[in-house]
Image: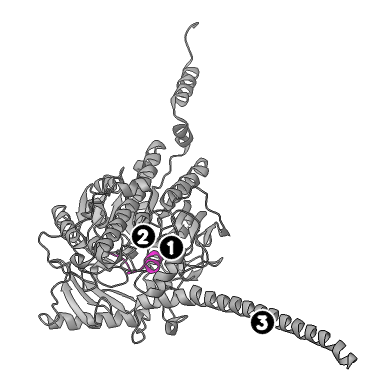
Amino acid sequence: MPGRLGGSRRAAIIITGALIAMTPAQAQRAPSAPKHPNIVILLADDWGFSDVGSFGSEIATPNIDALAKAGMRFSNFHVAGSCSPTRAMLQTGVMNHRNGLGNMPETIPDAHRGKPGYDTVMNLRVVTIAQLLKAAGYRTYLTGKWHLGSDAKRLPHARGYDRAYSLADAGADNFEQRPIEGMYDSAAWTENGKPATLPKDYYSSHFVVQRMIDYIEADRKGGKPFLASINFLANHIPVQAPDSDIARYSSMYKDGWTALREARAKRAAALGIVPAGVPIVTMPTTPDWKKLDADERAAAVRVMQAYGGMATAMDREVGRLVAHLKATGDYENTIFVFLSDNGAEPTNPFNSLRNRLYLDMQYDLATANIGRRGSFAAIGPGWASAAASPLSGYKFSATEGGLRVPLIIAWPGHADIRAGGISNGLAHVTDILPTLTELAGVPGHGGSWQGKAVEPVTGRSLVPVLNGQPGSVHGDAPLGYELSGNAALFRGDYKLVRNLAPTGDGKWRLFNLKVDPGETRDLAAAEPDRFAAMVVDYRAYAKANGVLDMPAGYTADEQINAYAFEQQGKPRLIRLGLWIGAVVALLSALVWGLRRRRRTRRVDQAEPDMVGA
C-alpha cells in the first residue's frame, strides 16, 4: 500500500539508522565482538608491597585502586627478588632455574655463567603466554621493559608477540633515549626486533601506554581478542617524574622513613591486607633518620617525593588505557592483571666514592633537580624498607619485602570474580599463566609444543580462588625459590628462608607467615621437626632445579658494580688509556721534532765557522 514500507525495507532503514547513530569506535567493533576475553598485563618495576593505595600507600593510585575494587587483591603473592627471573616466570609459568633465569646477567658470578639453568636469558625450552594465545587466535603485543634476552631469537617478536616496542636492558632514562650511565653503553630499544628511536616528547609511562593503544587500534578491524603486556619502567632507577607529579608530594615525607613505615603498616591492616598489630622490624641497613644532617634529609625527602610522583604518573597512564578501553567497548571483556616484578629497590648508587664522582660527571645531582630530566636518583634502603611495610627486606633478598608484592586480577564484566575481594592464600608468579589461559579458554601445552618437548608449566591456576575458594591452590605442597644465594621454601603457612649479606647471615630460619608476615620470630628452635622437614624439601627443590651454591663472599650489590665496571668502566678506562697513550705519543713526537729542528739549526749555524777556520 502507498505510504507504507515493506518489512525488509523497514528493517534495512532501522539498521542503517542504528549504524549512523553509533560512534566510530562502536561501528568498528559491532561486527566482531571477540569471543575470548582480552588480557591486559600491567607490570610495575620495583614497587614495594605497600606502594599501591589499596595495599596501604599514601601515594595516589586511584586507577589501580579502581581495578582492585572491580576485582581481587592477593595479599600473599610472591615473585622473584629481581626483575628478569620474575618476568620469565610470568611469561612462561615455569620456575626461573628451568626457564634460564637462575640469575641475571648483571648479578651472576662468573663461576655460574653458562651452567644449566644459568643462561641469563629466557631459554628456548619454554613457551610464552604470547605463543599460546597467538596460536589460539589472539593478537599479541608488548611494550616497555623486556630484559629477557637481546638477540634475534629472544626478543619479544621472536617469542610470540605480533608487535613489540621493548627495552632489552634492566632500565633506562625516563625522559630521553639514554642508558643508565655506567651500566650500559646505550638504551637498547627495539621495535619488532629492529633498533628504534624514541620520540622527542618521550616519557616512559606515557609512551608504553600510548604505543600499546596504537597497536590495539591498528589491528582492530581483524576482530581478534588481544593480549597487551605493558611493562613500565616505573619505579626503577633512575627515579624520574614530571614536575607536576613531584609537586603533588611537596609537603610529604618530611618525617622520614621510619614514620612512613609505621603509617603504612596501620593502613594495610585497616584495609585487611595484613592482620592488625603485626610486629615489624627495622632493617639493619636502614639509616637512622634523626642522625641525617639537613642537606641529607632534604635530598632524601625530595627523592621520595619524586618516587611518589613517578608512581602517580604511571597510575594516570593506567587510567588513560582503561578509559580508552571503556570508550571502545572493550573494558568489560578485558581481564586486567597488575603486579610488581619484585620488592622496592634498596641500592644506593652513591655508596662509593667512585660511583659518586662518575655520576656527578654524568648528571645534575643538585637536590632541586632530583627526579627531573637529567637527574639520577634512587630511594635507597631507608625508603625501600618503608615501601615494603610491614614486611622486612626488599629487592634482591628472599625476605617477604623482596618477594611479596601486590597482585590485582580483575575482569569487570565477569561476575565470578568477587569484586573487592582479598585472598590471603599463598600465590606465585608462575600461577599467572595457567590462570589466564583457563579464563581465556585457551589450552596449555602439557610439556610438548609444536612437536618438541618443552619445560612443563609449574604454576597452578588461581581461578578457584577468584571464584571464592578460600586458602591457597598450593595447599601444603612445598614451593621452592633461590636467586643469588638467597633462598626460601614455602609450605602452607610456613616459610623457610636464608639470606646472604647484607640482608642476612646465611643461616636458615623458619617463620609462620600467617601471623608473622614481617618475619620477626624465628621458629626453627621451637619447631625443629617442621624445620628439618622443610630443609629436606628445599634440598629436593634445589637438586631438581640445578641450583648452584654461591661463591664465598658473593653479594648482588658487589656483582652489579663488577658488571658495570666490566661492561662500561673497564672499556672506558681502556679507551681513556689509549687516548692518553695517543696524546703522549703525539706530544713525544712533537718534542722529538722540535729538538731535531733545533739540533739541525745549530749544525747549520756552526758550519760556516768551521769552513772559515
Q: Is residue 161 visible?
A: no
Q: Is residue 141 left or right of residue 89?
A: right
Q: Nearer the viewer, residue 272 or 168?
A: 168
The residue at which mark 2 appears reads as 45
Task: Tell me the amino acid under the disc marked 3.
Answer: Ser
Q: Is residue 161 magenta?
A: no
Q: Position of residue 591 (x, y in %)?
A: 68, 81
Q: CA distance from mark 2 to mark 3?
A: 52 Å
- Lower position in the chain sequence, tag 3 or tag 1: 1
Task: Tell me the amino acid under the disc marked 1.
Answer: Gly
Q: Farthest front residue?
A: 613
For the residues bearing labels 2 and 1, Cβ distance under 8 angstroms:
yes
Residue 588 badge: 3
For label 1, the SS is: loop
Q: Nearer the viewer, residue 190 or 204?
A: 204
Q: Is residue 565 placed above or below 138 in the rendered structure?
A: below
For the residues bearing labels 2 and 3, Cβ distance under 8 angstroms:
no
The region drawn magenta spans 77-88
Task: Tell me the amino acid under the disc marked 2.
Answer: Asp
Q: Is residue 515 left or right of residue 577?
A: left
Q: Is residue 271 left or right of residue 551?
A: left
Q: CA distance from mark 3 to mark 1?
A: 44 Å
For label 3, the SS is: helix
The residue at which mark 1 appears reads as 171
